[in-house]
Amino acid sequence: MNLVGLKKIANGCAGSRHSRSRRVLRHHRERFELEAESTADNRRDYRSMGTQKIFARRQVHKQKADTMDGTTISRGFRSRRQEQTPKNRLPPGQYVTTDFPVLSAGPTPQIKLGDWTFALQLGGSLLGKWNWAEFEALPQTTIKRDIHCVTKWSKLDTTWQGVTFDDLLKAVGLMEPPAPYIMAHCDGGYTTNVPVADLIGGKGMITTRYEGLPIPPAHGGPARLLVPHLYFWKSAKWVRRVRFMEKDQPGFWESFGYHNYGNPWKEQRYDGD
Amino acid sequence: MTDNVSDLVLEGNAAAALVQELFACDITIAQTQCDACGSVEGVGSLRQYAAPMGAVLRCTSCDSVLMRAVHTPHARWLEMKGARYLRF
Amino acid sequence: MTATETAAQPVRRLEWQLAQVREIVVETYRVRSLMLHVPDWQGHLPGQHTDIRLTAADGYQAQRSYSIASPPEDELLSLTVERVDNGEVSSYLVEELRAGDQFELRGPIGGYFVWTVAMDGPLCLIAGGSGVVPLMAMLRHRERRNGHAPTLLLYSSRSPEDVIYRAELDAMARRDPNLRVVNTLTRKQPDGWMGRRGRIDKALLAEECFPPEQGPKIFVCGSTPFVEDVSGFLVELGYDPLTIKTERFGPSGG
């Protein structure tokens, strides 16, 4: 690669063979020199330290008063809370991203569709089990929803396709859910608990397509639970079993600092919120 | 008290920081033994996951969870049931 | 990784110290190096990082970790920071911070991801984006100490504008016949670019890295997917996992 032409500033340390000095004399440095000119009491000070010459500015900013406990205040630093419209779509404390960040509690499982099965259980007994072809043959629903991660990003208008909980219950011949809670069990050992009331009536599904394409493994493919009205850690990746429970029990994050229910509109992020 | 679970993308080496902030000494050079498979390794070599929600440190041999750490506005959590010991 | 492979260090208590910004160096359009005076700094090893803490006027605090870019031989401590979209702390450090400002810093941390000239054998450094920072500390240390170990830096960047330390690395490689720097550009290449394109894959590693029989010490640093991909390839190519040290800069986007 060719060297970018290095502009030498007249009062630079010509003759210093140290790359550190030359690096400092970069073409963008003018911006900081201009800043320095505008600040009172500023002087540029060349100090030789052994074989190395460095440019140093005198400290010109008086730091604001320390806090009561002596912690230093960082001039000009403030918390970032983006003001995003439309306000009524964003739960409190969230901001919109166009990215789709990946967060996993473990390595991405490599699952072959030929080996994949999904099961509904009640206690120890099996209500239903499907392989991939059978699952794909179940009634498919496509929904468009906003999703909200507890780490404060929200992604609007995401499109998912899969099998709703209502259709799963119908497929195993149940008119009513057999218990009030479920625990989702996933490849890799992740678990999360959800009240059944938050899954029926079209509120939850087992999804296999995102934006019309198979869900990539890093995002939970081949299939993940989708409960978009709760924080996205509840939309468990790599789901394999949904087990109905009489009593609620906390899953992986719910038992370790995070809120048991996770309603973004009430900002229920953590245990104790 | 810090409230830094908010950032979208991690900046820097943050996953282990959630465990490190609970220890007075550099945890990355401490040795630990996986309770599931017995393998011994430095904490710095464990595979790290789950940041920024928390830190999940897994055995490089068998992927079992050795440690978890979470920092919420209400509490700091540390679980080490997957690790038999820490040796500094 | 066994303890015998880490540099011997005392077990020290970490305390918050004051870091004063002496100079800010523009590395790329979104990367800055902060040159810091830390009066009570006890020294560090190449590859280690620090925690920094910022406090707003209303008491709000944020804490992050950044790798040390300077070698232990340098007087000032240098942290190289990349501005991340929506990054609360990195945006402040890259856009707002000025010489004369100060913040709190704690370290050094990370006795595991460390290389010094005392370690024998060829050295293979593999960087994705801002993952080059701790590896640069190793290279600067190696140069300060006139290290002769055959060394490769394999450095993946999106475009020529994203290559951090570009001029310095070119100059280092020209000065030192035992150092090779191989850049690969994944998204955009300049006209007439004869170098590598695309991500680091198994074939590129097989061509460029010292073969496993030579027992190179390998350090991989970058985003989590980058590190996992590269480590996976290296293991498939026959490198002993115990010789591969990794440092991840968090989850991916998109």
Image: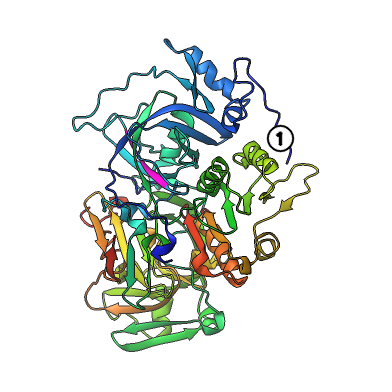
The percent coordinates of residue C109 (x first, y second) are 37, 49
Which of A93 and B88 lies nearest the eye of the viewer? B88
Which of B14 and A119 lies nearest the eye of the viewer? B14
**Does residue B47 show up?**
no
Residue at left offset 29%, top offset 22%:
A64
Q: Which residue is mark 1?
A: A3
Residue at left offset 49%, top offset 51%:
C116
Instruction: Classify the position of the N terminus of chain B by image quarter.
Output: top left
Q: How is the image coloured?
A: rainbow
Instruction: Classify the position of the C terminus of chain B by image quarter.
Output: bottom left
- Position above or below: A265 against C103: below
Residue at left offset 55%, top offset 79%:
A112
Q: Secondary structure at mark 1?
A: loop
The percent coordinates of residue B7 (x first, y second) are 40, 46
- Mark 1 — on which chain does it sit? A
Q: What amino acid is labelled 1 in the image?
A: Leu
**Does residue C32 show up?**
yes
Residue A70 placement: quadrant: top left
Looking at the image, which residue sits at the far top?
A: A40
Alpha-carbon neighbours of circle 1 within 10 Å: few (<14), some, or many (≥20)?
Answer: few
Magenta region: C49-55
